[in-house]
Image: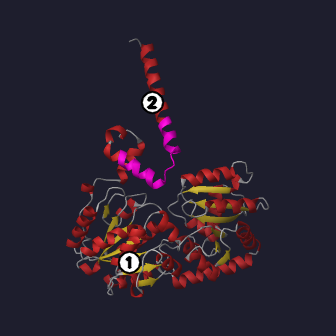
């Protein structure tokens, strides 16, 4: 075979292979499947046919997030901890970069570094971006979303119990199926429920809700609205039901340097000097209302040139397409910034003028506390969860649910009345300082687990 023939053969092979891959991708994206089902199919294919998919980038990423069960570490305890009273398990349903997982990470950090607990982490439904952050603080046991069995959970529970772990904080309803397994192994669990009914139904968490209600030592809800919603699926007796909003797990380093934050943020995004900022932070999906955020932005930006809108957070693919359609022919598109995932959002909160909580349903997102901490007033939709109820009481303005015109008017009012905005922001900051200390929140969770003697860094030094 001469050189020309080899060249043409290779060229034809490459073109054919590219056409097959692109065709398969086109068919795959066109199938009417939910994200959960897509991930399940991908997991099954990658697990059972590694030789077929081994050269794909997606396979290598999946492999990092789904180590074999045999590769999980066995129970370990920090050497500084001598007794079981200072050992605790923190369960997060996974390590994706969302609010509940950040809260779990904040708990692990404070329990290890401030309260001197021996902590081990269980990621029940797979890994994610935050896995390395968890691993930097404590041993991590990762189960896999689509093929972890009760036997795997039993083995892990028994291993942890043998190492002296008798208490666990289980974060989110999605992790509820581990509660009866831990209970059978002699590990008491308190569960933190953050989900409202829409999420419980859409993610099919009714069974987990029942397991939590039946087996948890206590169930902690961030707001009464969340407890009332959970009661639609499972009943928790009043003695075990606790209403306790989470604390603020990270303080804003720009809090006393807001003008510097604003200047640095403006330079980073190429904003004109003096531009006001309306901010939203969260997963850009339907529940968080990214489409409502864009609709509000378009309504305001057609009338004024002194403000830009910023959304921090990664995209839900379906909603990304919908928003791109909304913005396709808009002359205001350049003044709506989607910056993607940012692990540290402090500069955004401190540099903003207003936080836009556009969620259709949100139990008690930590971004509200972070905005309060920075002294930033919030506009929210009424009746959408515990944080919206808090905003109605202090630190912001609430308007009828999904009323974009009213939401836009409230933002414009705060932009035009800096005195009102400052008053609301100061009240919000004072409120979070007084009521949302993270250490106090963790102390309360420990008390619910029967831990009343805490050894923090100061007491150890003494």
Magenta part of the chain? 22-45
Residue farthest toward the left in the current orientation of the protein: 162
Q: State whether residue 393 is above or below residue 7.
A: below
Residue sitting nearer the eye, 5 or 252: 5
Residue 225 visible in this rendered orientation of the protein: yes
User: Between tags 1 and 2, which lies in front?
Assistant: 1
- Residue 257's x, y, as percent? 60, 71
At 32% from the left and 69% from the top, the residue drawn is 178
Residue 336 position within the rendered picture, expressed as x and y whole percent measured from the top left: 67, 57
Question: Relative to 228, is 53 on the left or the right?
Answer: left
Position in image of residue 450 (x %, y %) = 32, 85
Decide whether the magenta segment is chiefly helix, strand or loop. Answer: helix
Quadrant of the snapshot with the N terminus: top left
Q: Is residue 370 left or right of residue 44?
A: right
Q: Determine if residue 109 is in view.
A: no
Instruction: Quarter of the image for the C terminus: give it.
Output: bottom left
Residue on which the image places disc 1: 213
Q: Nearer the viewer, residue 232 or 159?
A: 232
Asked whether disc 1 touches disc 2, contact meaning CB atoms under 8 Å apart, the reply is no
Q: Which mark is residue 17?
A: 2
Residue drawn at 44 percent across, 60 percent down: 96
Label 1 and label 2: CA atoms lie apart by 53 Å
């Amino acid at each position: 075979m001469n050189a020309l023939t080899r060249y043409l053969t290779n060229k034809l092979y490459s073109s054919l292979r590219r056409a097959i891959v692109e065709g398969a991708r086109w068919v795959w994206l066109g199938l009417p499947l939910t994200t959960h089902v897509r991930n399940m199919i991908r997991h099954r294919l990658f697990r059972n046919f590694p030789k077929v998919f081994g050269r794909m980038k997606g396979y290598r990423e999946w492999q990092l997030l789904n180590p074999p069960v045999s590769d999980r570490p066995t129970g370990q305890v920090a050497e500084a901890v001598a007794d079981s009273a200072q050992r605790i398990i923190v369960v997060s349903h996974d390590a994706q970069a969302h609010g509940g997982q950040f809260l779990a990470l904040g708990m692990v950090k404070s329990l290890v570094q401030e309260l001197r607990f021996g902590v081990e982490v269980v990621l029940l439904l797979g890994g994610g971006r935050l896995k390395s952050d968890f691993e930097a603080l404590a041993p991590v046991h990762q189960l896999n979303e689509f093929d972890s069995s009760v036997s795997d959970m039993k083995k892990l529970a028994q291993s942890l119990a043998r190492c002296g772990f008798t208490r666990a904080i289980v974060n989110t309803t999605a992790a509820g199926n581990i509660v009866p397994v831990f209970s059978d192994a002699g590990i008491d669990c308190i569960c933190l429920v953050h989900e409202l009914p829409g999420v419980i139904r859409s993610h099919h968490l009714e069974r987990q809700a029942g397991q939590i209600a039946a087996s948890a030592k206590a169930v902690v809800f961030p707001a009464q609205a969340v407890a009332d919603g959970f009661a639609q699926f499972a009943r928790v007796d009043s003695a075990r039901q606790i209403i306790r909003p989470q604390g603020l797990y990270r303080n804003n380093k720009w809090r006393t340097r807001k003008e510097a934050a604003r200047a640095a943020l403006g330079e980073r995004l190429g904003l004109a000097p003096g531009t006001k900022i309306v901010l939203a932070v969260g997963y850009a999906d339907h529940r968080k209302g990214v489409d409502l955020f864009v609709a509000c932005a378009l309504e305001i930006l057609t009338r004024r040139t002194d403000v830009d809108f910023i959304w921090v957070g990664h995209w839900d693919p379906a909603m990304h397409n919908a928003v791109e359609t909304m913005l396709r022919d808009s002359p205001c598109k350049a003044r709506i910034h989607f910056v993607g995932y940012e692990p540290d959002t402090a500069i955004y909160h401190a540099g903003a003028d207003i936080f836009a909580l556009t969620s259709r349903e949100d139990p008690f997102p930590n971004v509200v506390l972070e905005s309060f901490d920075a002294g930033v007033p919030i506009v929210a939709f009424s009746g959408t969860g515990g944080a919206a109820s808090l905003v109605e009481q202090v630190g912001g303005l609430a308007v009828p649910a999904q009323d974009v015109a009213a939401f836009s008017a409230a933002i414009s009012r705060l932009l035009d009345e800096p005195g009102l905005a400052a008053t609301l922001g100061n009240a919000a900051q004072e409120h979070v300082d007084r009521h949302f200390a993270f250490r106090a929140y963790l102390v309360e969770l420990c008390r619910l687990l029967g831990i009343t003697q805490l050894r923090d860094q100061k007491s150890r030094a003494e």
